[in-house]
Amino acid sequence: MAYTAQDFKKGQPRWCPGCGDHFFLASLHKAMAEIGVEPWNTAVISGIGCSSRLPHYMATYGMNTIHGRAAAIATGCKVANPNLTVWQVSGDGDGLAIGGNHFIHANRRNINLNMILLNNRIYGLTKGQYSPTSPRGFVSKSSPYGTVEDPFRPAELCFGARGHFFARAVATDAPGTVEILKAAYNHKGAAVCEILQNCVIFNNGTHDAVYSKEGRAKNAIYVQHGKPLIFGENNEFGLMQEGFGLKVVKIGENGITEKDILVHDAHCEDNTLQLKLALMGNGDGFPVALGVIRDVDAPTYDDCVTAQIEEVKTQKKYHNFAELLETNDIWEVK
Amino acid sequence: MAEKLEMKELAEVAVRFSGDSGDGMQLAGNIFSTVSATVGNSISTFPDYPADIRAPQGSLTGVSGFQVHIGAEMVYTPGDKCDVLVAMNAAALKTQYKFAKPGAAIIIDTDAFGAADLKKAAFASEDYLGEMGIDPDRVIACPITQMVKDCLADSGMDVKAMLKCRNMFALGLVCWLFDRDLNIAFNFLKEKFAKKPGVAEANIKVIQAGYDYGHNTHSSVANVYRIETKNKVPGRYMDITGNKATAYGFIAAAEKAGLKLYLGSYPITPATDVLHELSKHKSLGVTTVQCEDEIAGCASAVGASFAGALGVTSTSGPGICLKSEAMNLAVIMELPLVVLDVQRGGPATGLPTKSEQTDLLQALFGRNGESPMPVIAATSPTDCFDAAYSAAKMALEHMTPVILMTDAYVANGSAAFKLPNLADYPAINPPYVPEELKGSWAPYLRNPETGVRYWAVPGREGFQHILGGLEKDNKTGAISTDPENHNLMTHLRQEKIDKIQVPDLEVLGDKDDADLLIVGFGGTYGHLHAAMDELRAQGKKVALAHFKFINPLPKNTAEVLKKYPKVVVAEQNMGQLAGWLRMKVDNFVPEQFNQVKGQPFAVAELVEAFNAIINK
């Protein structure tokens, strides 16, 4: 059966007008329709925070749980019922601060979850404190003189936890978002999608450089597996390796042709260059990488759990409780 | 040496096997209890492990003990102190003698009392018996190590392998002392080592040698003993610890309910054996996830329940602290969940390997908001099976998290377990949403009689819904901050728990005319029962009412508690059950006996304290 976005929609979102979550929600509905998994075989599980309200606007099964635990709850849900397609939705506070432990372990175990990280670099629901993705020196209600700590870079955390999938999109970029959501679904294993998303009230403009189509044309690069890493309003720039790092080059200058440009390999097991792509930032004179940065096959935890159960079933001779009892040292009193 | 050997009949006897952690005291104790149980004696056992992870051989901290209590009639505890102490080395004698009754027979391996052994055990001289104040006439001093080597000289085994059989020599001696049928022990070993017949044969040879040694020398004791069997309950039995029985109860309940069993857990003493046990049984489809922390253990179990499994999480008190937010999520989402708390000494890390009942109020109240949750406390190692089954049934049928409390004593102790027949256990029927409600159903629609909401498991078309930690409208299931609705939902959640039917409180002993009613809960049942028996043997009028179902309380609670002139609530905490009962029963002011030592009650101390109350 073919679905439309409407089949996944429910209720009226209560986010602030202009909030990035509105854009993301629309893309998620669209992506789910295109993916085509039935709403009743889909579960959307969030923690707490503005973005964690999202399951209430889904016509699927869902849970809006407790702060930070969405990945752990989604883990149990997926392992107990591997037939469900499970989407876990968290903000940067829910996913990387209070829920940081579950984020890394879900990645390490490679649970087949689609893990959405809505990153607005601020705590919105509690009205404006810095988050673990706020840049050093960030001024907020809880850091009136600026923070004195470095932020997490989500890709680095994902890769450090041996994550096998990382993609990034800007909330306002519907095609880009839908594309990575579908890629996350198609990837078997933990699939982290970082969504750059604006908080109009408490951190307005945090992703300005890439929030508009024009901005992305200048300041972002869409990475595609097997394609050269070219960007710019007229595709005039490219990325090349230099020493241990990357450099931006202009095609046609200094004898550089398109053939010299680094070709993206999302399937490369070694994540070194993928990490370099993921960490590029405008402040360093690099474009922000969007799209599927890493997508490497690996055995999923839930598949392995199921396979191990099936294997042990063939090895052991007891398959119900009565037979289990008989495996013990038994004596008879007459 | 005794001149003449008499056969003396005993009602009960406690034997403590002790030695180095590697000396196989567990196995010797297990075989002895099995041999005794097979002839129909009642048994209760308790292992006492060293706290050190791997203490040096022969050291005081490396001593491991295993106490077996056998009786002609029901025994309820492993016994305060033992009648026979087996000490396989100097350190064992030094640390374990305090568990021996005055006049107890002591069996020692004199080969393990050399100068180096005595030094490791901090004896000052070679007169170790004198230092301990032990009468040499009570000691069966036998060169066990040498005799085992001699016995196995022709076996072709190396010395290290031979020495692993020392425990069997001691076991043979004890079997002689208690006139046990060695064939039962032989059969046990043949089955246990079915794949290593050589090992079985060597062990059997050494047991026989130990037995013969006792028989030929009459050792230094005046009697051999016989424990007759009365009130045999015919049937097939196995030895089971509380933790294993708990795991079996979950497996049985999941099978009865036709659900997958999911355990989310994080290792913690003394609950870890439940994780170990359930992890073994993948051929039954049991799924266990060793999570990144206690929080994830509980949270993932909630996720598993949402997905349609029986979600269970196992832990001890410190883990409950961490799980409480996710437990509360299950309260407000009204999903089934069983939370196992194997209590240990607290607060904080406390006494990890020791036993207390100090988590009761935490179980009842340790969460934010109005958060009613059923609480069940297992009363013995074998009762852990029934308690776990009841907890799972209650969680699934009433759509609620349930706390199952055991403790280190019950969890590690063992007893003979009559093999249950699952067909005899009540059906488990979760309230799945009826198909005809499609279109009109909402998540908090309730069965008007039980107050239980219906369960729609993901995968069912037409019942998609959102649950969550925010308060919901009682009709639509949408988020609601309406004051009247919150008040209503708070009442509905409480009423749902209050309506759960639990068995009436049973009164044992002099239930019509007791001068003193003893009240307890959970793992102290055996000790309180033994204390009651002792007091009644002294001619006192005493009864016992022991709580297994703590929330909701049995309907006849007030009636029972108000019936007797004196009531004492005895518990291993500062009065938590007494406080709960006083909250629930008007004008109930009991006497209290509170002891928080990390050790099981001593029956003798209970008897003394209860006598003082009777005589007051």
Image (cartoon, rainbow, N blue to C red):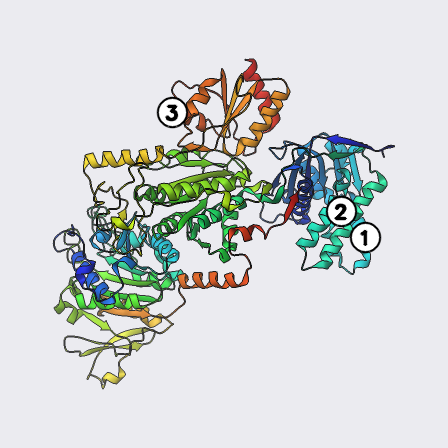
What is the three-letter code of the residue carrying label 1?
A: Cys
Place of residue B542 in the rendered image (x, y in percent of width and height, measured from the top left): 56, 20
Number of the label disc, if any, that sits on residue B583: 3
Residue positioned 86% across, 32% down in the render? B4
Please state the chain letter of the residue tagged with numbered disc 2 in the rendered image.
Answer: B
Q: CA distance from mark 2 to mark 1?
A: 10 Å
Q: Name the residue carrying label 2.
A: B169
Place of residue B247 in the rendered image (x, y in percent of width and height, measured from the top left): 50, 47
Residue positioned 23% across, 83% down in the render? A258
Q: Is residue B388 left or right of residue B33?
A: left
Give above or below for A290 relative to B196: below
Give above or below for B378 relative to B288: above
Q: CA distance from mark 1 to mark 3?
A: 66 Å
Q: Residues within 10 Å of mark 3 (few under 14, many from 20)?
A: few
Place of residue A260 in the rendered image (x, y in percent of width and height, measured from the top left): 27, 83
Q: Nearer the viewer, residue B185 or B572?
A: B185
Q: Quadrant of residue A209?
A: bottom left
Badge 2 and badge 1 in a common chain: yes
What is the three-letter code of the residue carrying label 3?
A: Met
SS of the residue under disc 3: helix
Q: Name the residue carrying label 1.
A: B151
Res. A149 in view: no
Q: Residue furthest bottom?
A: A255
Q: Nearer the viewer, residue A109 or B242?
A: B242
Q: Quadrant of residue B49?
A: top right
